[in-house]
């Protein structure tokens, strides 16, 4: 059965059924995720109490797992905006049933990413020093520094994607309000801002939505470019590269699409919405992953080519060492999982198998985490002078906080899917034929 | 005499459009269409002018652009410390500041525009609204004088309204 065979009321009931009061299993999973978050919070509290010495960070590797996690989570966020804004402007119809979840993933991933610079700061209570505000010391942040540009980019991204997400939800929260009873009805009534679906409202809403999409599109490209410049604007071998911006953006979308698969496949099974999130939708994402995987693979090859062709011995040495040195295992996980495994999606049987899509999605996520780890750690561990070389091994605290971040991300998404419509009701209806009496069918 | 509000509930879009054409010719005091989906035909008939939200978006974006460059240049001159051998006023990195604030202010101003043009939040649900309008029914509500009531009721019914209510 295709989505277009559904009627308007079937779309409402299929999506709103997801919001029915949860069963015991839901609370079980909630408790598990809260426990994982608890592990991360405890580890962070321990780090605040004891100081940064509890991490593996030291000379020469001052950026490790926390910055890896930051770049990883910002990257995860990207495909949400790609699906919700860029594909909206391109009028790609397959995005309709998945964009809400992808957009929610964006907001939650940026919320997760935003924690890591704070965790990495050590003295977290001084985080506000990063923002430009008038103060009695007459000090302003250095706007020539990519780190400050990053603060601006990520906080803009969080604000804009949250607004875009909330505005997109309004018609569907109103639909939930109209069906709900008791306290839920009151909460939805407040959140819907009094949406009534009048012609005037649809008119202004349509215009605003288009602007949000048009503004979010260049923003998403800029955010990971700016994140890449945190590295590229330094002079460290392996970081100082002009291809970093497109390379990071493609990698971000690559990991984000894989995370969408990781989230949507269980979601459509648990909530029984296979009629809305169809195999065709998942296959379309697998095709996008082929493209981003090819770009990422090309970037890996280009880095090696430049290292050799430039004749720069430091650049050459870092790439030789990445592939054969202390971090070779991590490096080859990155290469195989990100650029070779996605090629399996060229086989139609694989990209139309839910089990394969889910498994390969997870492998790509693992690969993309290692990509950031390899880029960040190896370059710092092995820069110009052999005397200054060193080795970094993450501590248990860093692992615990990373684990906690996964718990936090999935906890946010899990709570969202039960409380707000995770599939757009209004936009799905736009895909269906209009209910007309003459020569049509009932809605 | 006090005017009355009539609302016709339609299951089909073509019937709604037929009723809308006829009702519009009679120029009622107030006319509202409720719909579970947006449709360009409704906009062509009822809201032919582009939404003023676009002016908000432009104003916000320009404020952000000039504000971003202004903030970066002004604050750098306030503390003229050379870092990384770059000029105090370095335009290339300031493009990022200008760009991010263009997007940020553009989006926030669009939100403000949407709130102002539609008086969000508007929690009072009018009597003509029906919970089915967010599911699969279209509504055509008009406010007319008591004398015109029967005439408008007949138009709505003849176009194919399933129900006509007086509120």
Image (cartoon, coloured by chain):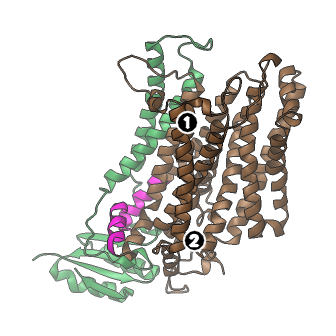
Chain colours: A brown, B green
Residue reaching furthest to the left? B1
Q: Which residues are magenta?
A: A182-209
Kindly identify the residue that appears in the image at 37 percent across and 52 percent down: B114
Image: B59 above or below B8: above
Chain to which the residue tagged by mark 2 belongs: A
| Callout 1–callout 2 Cβ contact below 8 Å | no
Task: Please state if A17 lies on the left or on the right of A380 as rendered.
Answer: left
Task: Please state if B90 lies on the left or on the right of A332 as rendered.
Answer: left
Residue, disc 1: A47
Residue A79 seen in the figure = yes
Residue A443 point in image, percent of width and height: 50, 82
Q: Give the Cα separation between the discs numbered 1 and 2.
A: 51 Å
Kindly identify the residue that appears in the image at 60 percent across and 73 percent down: A270
Q: Which mark is residue B157?
A: none
Residue, disc 2: A431
Under circle 1, the secondary element is helix
């Amino acid at each position: 059965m295709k989505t277009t065979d559904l009627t308007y009321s079937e779309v409402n009931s299929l999506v709103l059924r997801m919001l029915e009061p949860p069963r015991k299993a839901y609370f079980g999973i909630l408790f598990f995720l809260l426990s994982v978050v608890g592990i991360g919070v405890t580890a962070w509290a321990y780090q605040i109490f004891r100081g940064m010495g509890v991490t593996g960070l030291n000379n020469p590797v001052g950026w490790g797992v926390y910055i890896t996690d930051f770049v990883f989570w910002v990257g995860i966020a990207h495909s949400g905006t790609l699906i919700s804004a860029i594909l909206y402007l391109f009028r790609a119809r397959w995005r309709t049933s998945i964009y809400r979840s992808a957009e929610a993933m964006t907001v939650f991933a940026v919320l997760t990413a935003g924690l890591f610079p704070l965790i990495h700061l050590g003295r977290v209570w001084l985080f506000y020093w990063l923002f430009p505000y008038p103060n009695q010391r007459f000090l302003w942040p250095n706007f020539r520094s990519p780190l400050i540009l990053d603060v601006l980019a990520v906080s803009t991204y969080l604000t804009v994607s949250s607004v875009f997400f909330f505005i997109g939800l309004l018609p569907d929260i109103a639909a939930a309000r109209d069906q709900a009873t008791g306290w839920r009805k009151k909460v939805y009534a407040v959140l819907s801002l009094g949406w009534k679906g009048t012609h005037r409202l649809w008119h202004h809403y349509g215009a605003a939505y288009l602007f949000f999409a048009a503004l979010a599109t260049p923003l998403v490209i800029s955010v990971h470019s700016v994140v890449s410049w945190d590295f590229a604007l330094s002079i460290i071998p392996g970081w100082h590269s002009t291809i970093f911006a497109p390379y990071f953006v493609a990698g971000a979308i690559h990991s984000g699409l894989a995370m969408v698969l990781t989230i949507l496949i269980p979601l459509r099974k648990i909530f029984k919405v296979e009629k809305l999130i169809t195999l065709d939708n998942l296959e379309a994402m697998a095709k996008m992953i082929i493209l981003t995987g090819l770009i990422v693979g090309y970037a890996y090859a280009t880095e090696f080519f430049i290292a050799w062709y430039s004749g720069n011995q430091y650049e050459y040495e870092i790439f030789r060492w990445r592939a054969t040195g202390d971090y070779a295992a991590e490096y080859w996980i990155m290469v195989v999982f990100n650029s070779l495994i996605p090629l399996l999606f060229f086989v139609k049987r694989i990209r139309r198998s839910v089990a394969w899509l889910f498994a390969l999605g997870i492998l790509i996520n693992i690969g993309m985490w290692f990509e950031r780890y390899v880029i960040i750690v190896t370059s710092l561990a092995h820069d110009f002078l052999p005397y200054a070389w060193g080795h970094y091994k993450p501590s248990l605290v860093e692992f615990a906080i990373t684990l906690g971040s996964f718990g936090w991300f999935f906890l946010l998404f899990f709570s969202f899917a039960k409380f707000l419509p995770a599939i757009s009701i209004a936009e799905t209806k736009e895909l269906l034929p209009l209910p007309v009496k003459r020569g049509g069918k009932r809605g | 005499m006090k005017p009355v509000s009539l609302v016709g509930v339609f299951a089909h879009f073509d019937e709604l459009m037929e009723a809308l054409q006829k009702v519009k010719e009679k120029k009622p005091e107030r006319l509202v269409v409720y719909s579970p989906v947006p449709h360009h035909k409704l906009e062509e008939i009822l809201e032919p002018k582009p939404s003023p939200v676009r002016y908000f978006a432009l104003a916000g974006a320009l404020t952000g652009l000039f504000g971003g460059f202004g903030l970066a240049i002004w604050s750098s001159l306030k503390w003229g410390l050379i870092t990384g051998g770059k000029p105090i006023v370095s335009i290339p990195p300031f493009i990022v500041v200008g760009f991010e604030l263009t997007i940020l202010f553009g989006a926030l101003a669009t939100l403000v525009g949407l709130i102002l043009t539609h008086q969000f939040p508007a929690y009072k649900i009018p009597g003509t609204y029906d919970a089915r309008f967010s599911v699969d029914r279209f509504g055509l509500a008009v406010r007319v004088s008591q004398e015109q009531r029967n005439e408008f009721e007949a138009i709505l019914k003849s176009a194919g309204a399933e129900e006509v209510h007086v509120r």
